[in-house]
Image: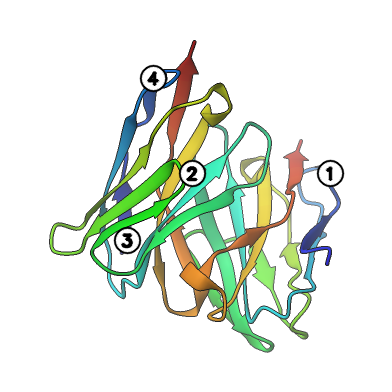
Amino acid sequence: GQSLEQPSEVTAVEGAIVQINCTYQTSGFYGLSWYQQHDGGAPTFLSYNGLDGLEETGRFSSFLSRSDSYGYLLLQELQMKDSASYFCAVGSWGGKLIFGQGTELSVKP
Amino acid sequence: NAGVTQTPKFQVLKTGQSMTLQCAQDMNHEYMSWYRQDPGMGLRLIHYSVGAGITDQGEVPNGYNVSRSTTEDFPLRLLSAAPSQTSVYFCASSSDRVPGNEQFFGPGTRLTVL
């Protein structure tokens, strides 16, 4: 089977940096993805790590360590609009994606 | 391009009724999936398809049927609705041709079963 663990909620202030961790147990692992979801909306893709290391996309970075079955999403220069739920997901063949339960990020002024 | 479309946006059913949630994509993606999301929870994979004529079960397939007769369409059928199926349903598509196998989600169908 597959399972993912991430914190249920994180609070940070505007302008700060926050890290959301994700640990996973899975078979047939292709990579670790991160998605953002605002209240009532559809999830949107943020980042993907197929190999170990850091991927950077603007204010967002994501890291993967396959040997540790661990990854994280790093959000810098937090803005109020970053308040949302963030999901890590493990991918396998055929576009199959299994999601974690999500981390609700609250950004305070 | 419309991307991934889902109909209806909202639906109320009575226990025991059946219905089909529609999903279509116009990006020629080979992979399509159905998820359900309950309040405060992540997305759970119901069924997925790797191409026309090929489907497989996800994490929570019971009570749902799917078929994939064309690349574009991937309907989800509830055979006999139960209150436990009250949820938001998202359809998604992806492709090996897209970097990171990014999944593109539809806007969701909000289903209530009374």
Chain letter of mark 2 equals B
Name the quarter where the N terminus of chain B is drawn.
bottom right
Label 1's element?
strand
Cα distance in 3D space between marks 3 and 2: 14 Å
Task: Say which residue appears at 75% left-offset and 42% top-offset.
Answer: B110
Q: Tag on residue A11?
A: 4
Q: Same chain for marks 4 and 2?
A: no
Determine whether label 4 and label 2 are within 8 Å by CB: no
Label 3's element?
loop
Q: Position of residue A12 (x, y in %)?
A: 38, 19
Task: Say which residue appears at 71% left-offset and 78% top-offset.
Answer: B67
Label 2's element?
loop
Lower position in the chain sequence, tag 3 or tag 4 = 3
- Residue under label 1, please give it: B11
- Residue under label 3, please give it: A2
Q: Amino acid at mark 2?
A: Gly
- Which is in the foreground here, disc 3 or disc 4? 4
Cα distance in 3D space between marks 3 and 4: 28 Å
Determine whether label 3 and label 2 are within 8 Å by CB: no
Q: Quick check: A102 left or right of B14?
A: left
| Residue sitting nearer the eye, A71 or B91 | A71
Task: Say which residue appears at 52% left-offset and 59% top-offset.
Answer: B45
- Residue under label 2, please give it: B42
Question: Quick check: can you spot residue B43?
Answer: yes
Cα distance in 3D space between marks 3 and 1: 31 Å
Cα distance in 3D space between marks 4 and 2: 19 Å
